[in-house]
Image (cartoon, helix red, strand yellow):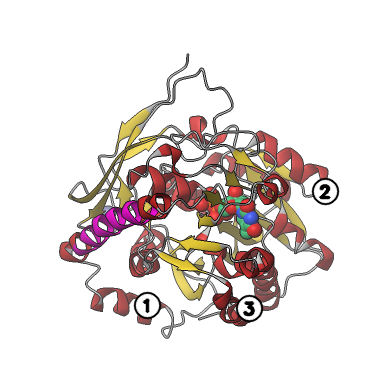
Amino acid sequence: MQHTRVTPVRSCRVCGADDWHTFLELGRVPLANSFVTDESVPEEIFPLALMSCRECRLMSLTHVVDEHDLYDHYFYVSSPSRLIHRHMEGLAKHYRGALDLGADSLVVEIGSNNGDQLAKFQPHGCQVLGIDPAQNITAQARDRGVDTRTDFFTEEVAKSVRADRGQADLIMARHVIAHIDDLHDLVAGVRELLAPDGFFALEVPYLVELINRRAFDTVYHEHLSYFLVGTLQRLFQEFGMRVVDVAGFDVHGGSIVVTVAHDDSRHRTNPDTVDARIKAEADAGLYRDDAYDGFADIVDTLRASLRASLLDLRGEGLRLAGYGASAKGVTLLTTSQVPPGSLDFCSDTTPEKQGTLIPGLGIPVVSPEEAAEREPDVYVLLAWNYRDEILAKEADFLERGGRFFVPIPEPRLVGAEELAAAAGRTVSTGARS
Ligand code: TYD
Ligand code: ZN
């Protein structure tokens, strides 16, 4: 059997310093997207812990798993969520307007997955190119007509794309740079490929939101880095670029879209978003160690309370099942030491996940149709980032007396009484803030 390679992180992938403050140990955990298809193969587990760079305040995992082991065959398919589609549509519209993109424009996406985001530019005549290492998912993108190259994005790949297609007016990277160890190579590639007045639009989960929402379960081996705006500003400055705008969105547990341009481009930096965010980060103490120690205490308390609440529900004789076999769920359940048998099964819409077992827990993943037949008393909402959308979709289950256990920011049971409020929120979420 081929063993997965794992390496301790020494120097900071943003600033190069090696002065780390390690503040949260989550134990040894399996890879969150390594859904089990063959029970006879023993599962490997790897250390999962967080540290903060005292120089630039990058938050990083302490260990990195080799990228080929994580991504060559990848289970994560961009969700069929309406909220996310609306968000992608909004981004496409925003950048088309801001850059006046048209028939001669080239939009490149790093980590383009099944091509959902790029497809939003095609009706407007833009040329598109996706770059993504997952063979199975890039094949799906090509099948639907989104030109996609199966590769990791590197400076070398950027040069070859530039030679073939010219420079890009817009480069997007949504929820991907947290997955990349060699950030300097990535940013050098962006600098190479980006047209003089182009934009690099980077979407990341926002570290401030992760802390505020106590979203410790978004920590897993694929997410190497967690960013403040100040840390990103520092990264791009080293490469002759600057952050010109920042917008917050209520997707994936609270994300920011950071717009980056060449230093000498025509674009002005927006102080009301960029400088204001960095100041707020400093005011919240996030450039000091103690804020992270405080967060670790909160997470330890939350993990204990998640375990106790689920054991209590089970003790009352209620049948529990998971809803959404998310990667987050693996961190949530394994690091809270929830006994593996606590959930009978987990419902998930992703065909690739159905028929597998959740890593480390042995919980069978079933289709929503099968889940409806085996309906539990309580669904543990492992995809809490889609809470309102899922509550609305499962209105019948709630009306019949079913309940959802929402784990984050603190354990809470919700029933039909929450429906009206959730419906109100889905109208307003995804908006710029
Ligand atoms: P997601 O939050 O997208 O990501 P991560 O794995 O990064 O934590 O995972 C959500 C999972 O939930 C995904 O496998 C799809 C599934 N899902 C459903 O089963 N039903 C739904 O209605 C939605 C929105 C997602
Ligand atoms: Zn650093």
Disc number placed over residue 145 in the picture, else none:
2
Disc number placed over residue 277 in the picture, else none:
1
Type of the residue with mark 1:
Arg
Q: Residue at x 54, y 30 (%)?
A: 36
Q: Say whether residue 202 is visible.
A: no
The magenta-colored residue range is 294-310
**Do the numbered discs 1 and 3 sit on residues whose CB atoms are within 8 Å?**
no
Q: Residue at x 30, y 58 (%)?
A: 305
Q: Secondary structure at mark 1?
A: helix
Q: Which badge, 1 or 3, is on the more N-terminal residue? A: 1
Q: Say whether residue 418 is visible.
A: yes
Q: Residue at x 76, y 58 (%)?
A: 119
Q: Secondary structure at mark 3?
A: helix
Is residue 56 positioned above or below 321 on the image? below
Disc number placed over residue 423 in the picture, else none:
3
* Residue 85 percent across, percent down from the top left: 69, 65
Is residue 173 positioned above or below 364 on the image? below
Q: Quadrant of residue 411?
A: bottom left
Give the Cα separation between the discs numbered 1 and 2.
39 Å
User: Main SS of the magenta segment?
Assistant: helix
Q: How many other residues sit within 10 Å of disc 3, few (<14), some (14-19) or many (≥20)?
A: some
Q: Secondary structure at mark 2?
A: loop
Report whether 221 appears left or right of 420: left
Q: Quadrant of residue 339?
A: top left
Q: Which badge, 1 or 2, is on the more N-terminal residue? A: 2
- Tell me the quadrant of ligand 2: bottom left
Q: Residue furthest top?
A: 1
